[in-house]
Amino acid sequence: MSPMGQQESQKDSNRKETIEGIGTQEHITVENMAEFMTTPEDTMCELSLNESDYDAEPTLLYSSLQKKQWAEAMAIIESTPNEARTWVYRKEAKGTKIRWRLLPLHGAIIFQAPAEVVESLLLIFPEGASERDDEGSLPIHLAYKRGAAAAVCK
């Protein structure tokens, strides 16, 4: 195997270990988040996304999803589409450990939003479907775990 091939193999092995560590032994913090980004694609995607601390200033979109104000959420998706790509996170009460971290798509599924809200989020930010939350779950995993309607799982 060439030196380049060995580096790629080691990188894949490291990535697998990192993914397996999410939500189990290792904890993602604001300070160590870069450690969990192991490819240039991860870094580029992460840099293009925004973040919002739930306790300091949650996004309007996340707040409307949490309150199950679906019409308001739809209006925000249309008027401020960048909020669809904004991660909302919450830290532990003491320290810097991340308690949870979600995109609005994850939140919409957790809060059992109607299919039209989920669809709107996917249309605005389709890449969100391949983003993992703090526990390593894709939105589709959350949908199945929560018994989402078939229309949401499509």
Image (cartoon, rainbow, N blue to C red):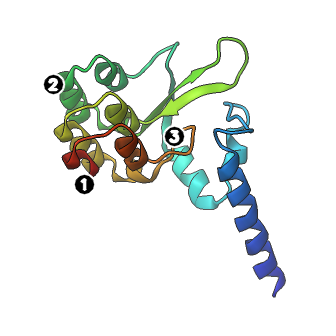
Q: Secondary structure at mark 2?
A: helix
Residue 122: x and y in percent read 29, 48
Q: Residue most toward the right?
A: 3
Find disc 2 in the rendering and name its residue: 71
Q: Are marks 3 and 2 in contact (CB under 8 Å)?
A: no
- In space, the residues marked 1 and 2 are separated at their CA atoms by 22 Å
Question: Between disc 3 and disc 2, whose residue precedes?
Answer: 2
Q: Are marks 1 and 3 in contact (CB under 8 Å)?
A: no
Which residue occupies 57% across, 59% down?
41
Disc 3 crowd, CA 10 A, few/some/many (<14, 14-19, 20+) = many
Q: Secondary structure at mark 3?
A: loop
Find disc 3 in the rendering and name its residue: 133
Q: Is residue 31 above or below residue 138?
A: above
Q: Amino acid at mark 3?
A: Asp
Q: Amino acid at mark 1?
A: Lys
Find disc 1 in the rendering and name its residue: 154
Camera-nearest residue between 50 and 154: 154
Q: Secondary structure at mark 1?
A: loop
Question: Between disc 1 and disc 2, whose residue precedes?
Answer: 2
Which residue occupies 75% across, 73% down?
9
Residue 95: x and y in percent read 73, 17
Which quadrant: the N terminus? Answer: bottom right
144 left or right of 77? right
Q: Is residue 64 above or below residue 140?
A: above
Q: Amino acid at mark 2?
A: Ala
- In space, the residues marked 3 and 2 are separated at their CA atoms by 25 Å
Q: Quadrant of residue 112?
A: top left
Camera-nearest residue between 133 and 23: 23
